[in-house]
């Protein structure tokens, strides 16, 4: 779903104007080490749960909201694992965008929750062991690695 404020921007500037948007990505890991992925309805690809921040929303609150909207789970962000910049992307609807991505490692707020495809952005969800991941983009593998590296500090591209 396109957030209303992005839709209003698109109505003003059209799909070819690059929008620079703040986003969040969640690596949700269970105690058994498995990670949650969802299959996106726009591309059919397996990916991290993610989304665009609402105006004024903090990244931590946004990642909690996105996981609940897409997979029906309550999570707790454990740490900010990385801050990255996506490549420019042309979405299936034709919109051009680029994202400042806040990558969070999250845990379930309540054990035993059942993940489910909870909105129209998600075709299906699944828990995967790191040695049994489905086919997905290289950037998703990279973000999983950053979140699960065990580093206390957030990763970012060095300046210069």
Image (spheres, rainbow, N blue to C red):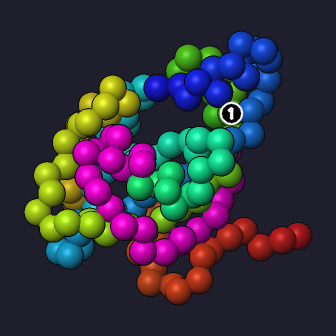
Which residue does the image show at 11% across and 63% down from the upper left?
112
Horizontal and vertical percent for residue 122? 32, 34
Which residue does the image show at 62% across and 74% down from the upper left?
155
Query: Can residue 25 be seen?
Result: no
**Position of residue 84 in the picture relative to residue 130 (left or right):** right
Quarter of the view holding residue 116: top left
Give neighbour class at mark 1: few <14, some 14-19, many 20+ (Cα, 10 Å).
Answer: some
Read off the magenta span: 65-87
Taking 116 as reference, is 6 above or below it? above
- Name, please, the residue furthest toward the left: 112
Taking 151 as reference, is 38 above or below it? above
**Position of residue 29 in the picture relative to residue 12 (left or right):** left
Q: Nearer the viewer, residue 147 or 69?
A: 69
Taking 72 as reference, is 113 above or below it? below
Which residue does the image show at 50% across and 51% down from the upper left?
62
Taking 108 as reference, is 44 above or below it? above
Horizontal and vertical percent for residue 88? 69, 38
- Name, please, the residue furthest toward the front: 56
The residue that mark 1 highlights is 97
Which residue does the image show at 14% across and 52% down from the upper left?
114
């Amino acid at each position: 779903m396109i957030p209303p404020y992005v839709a209003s921007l698109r109505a003003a500037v059209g799909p070819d104007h690059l929008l620079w948007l703040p986003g969040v990505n969640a690596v949700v890991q269970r105690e058994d080490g498995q990670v949650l992925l969802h299959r996106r309805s726009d591309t059919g690809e397996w990916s991290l749960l993610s989304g665009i921040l609402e105006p004024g929303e903090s990244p931590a609150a946004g990642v909690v909201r996105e996981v609940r909207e897409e997979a029906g789970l309550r999570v707790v962000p454990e740490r900010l694992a990385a801050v990255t910049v996506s490549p420019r992307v042309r979405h299936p609807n034709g919109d051009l965008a680029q994202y400042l991505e806040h990558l969070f490692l999250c845990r379930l707020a309540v054990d035993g929750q059942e993940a489910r495809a909870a909105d129209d952005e998600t075709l299906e969800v699944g828990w995967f062991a790191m040695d049994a991941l489905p086919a997905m983009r290289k950037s998703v593998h990279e973000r999983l690695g950053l979140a699960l590296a065990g580093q206390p500090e957030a990763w970012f591209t060095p300046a210069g």
